[in-house]
Amino acid sequence: MQKNLYLIIILFSLTSCYTYQVKKPAAPPTDNKQALKKNSASMPMKSATSEFQNQDSQQPPAPINIQEKLAANKNVKIDVDGRSYKVIVDRWESDSLVVHPVNSPKKTLKFHKNQINGEKIAEKRFSEPLSNLLTGAIYVGIAAGILYLVR
């Protein structure tokens, strides 16, 4: 029982509240779609659906600017040619990104911007739900330890 408790305490102390999260793109304004739905009640069904499809086809997805996402000194997880790297961005040299891995600052890596998958760029951020979960688990562990000592 004591060995399991020590193991659990060690595991919680080694867990980090920082996770790599992909930034979700901002949602386009939905005012036009809501107005279209209101107007479609008075229109025949075919014209409303064709107008709705034309409106969606006119708005192409926003291009992903990799150079803005990967600014200097950012801690990110990038996907390059199918491999995942946790790196810290150093600088941009024309179309090439110069980075170093998180755990080895002396080693440098260089990637062309066409090699980097822009949709899978994940920034290192503080995860509040994970933090709350760890805090609750630690409080439960402390309470269990106090109850064990009292008995």
Image (tube, rainbow, N blue to C red):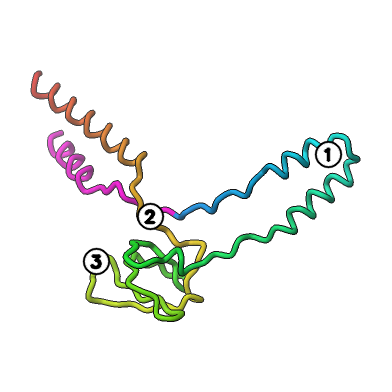
Determine whether, in the image, residue 121 is placed left or right of residue 74.
Answer: right
Give the residue displayed 18% in from the left and 40% down from the top.
Answer: 9
Amino acid under label 3?
Answer: Asn
Q: Quadrant of the C terminus?
A: top left
**Mark 1 or 2, closer to the camera:** 1
- Magenta span has 16? yes
> Residue 27: x and y, percent?
59, 48
The disc, 3 or 1, on the residue closer to the chain's N-terminal end is 1
The disc at residue 103 is 3
The disc, 1 or 2, on the residue closer to the chain's N-terminal end is 2
Which of the two residues, 73 or 82, is positioned nearer the viewer here? Answer: 73
> Residue 49: x and y, percent?
83, 47
Q: Quadrant of residue 48?
A: top right
Gap between marks 1 and 2, in whole Å? 42 Å
Residue that mark 2 sits on: 20
> Residue 108: x and y, percent?
29, 77
Under circle 3, the secondary element is loop
- Magenta span has 125? no
Q: Which residues are magenta?
A: 1-21
Judge whether 84 appears above or below 13 on screen. Answer: below
The disc at residue 98 is none
Residue furthest to the top in view is: 151
Under circle 1, the secondary element is helix
Amino acid under label 2?
Answer: Tyr
Amino acid under label 1?
Answer: Ser
Under circle 2, the secondary element is strand
Residue that mark 1 sits on: 40
Callout 1: few (<14), some (14-19), or many (20+) C-alpha neighbours within 10 Å? some
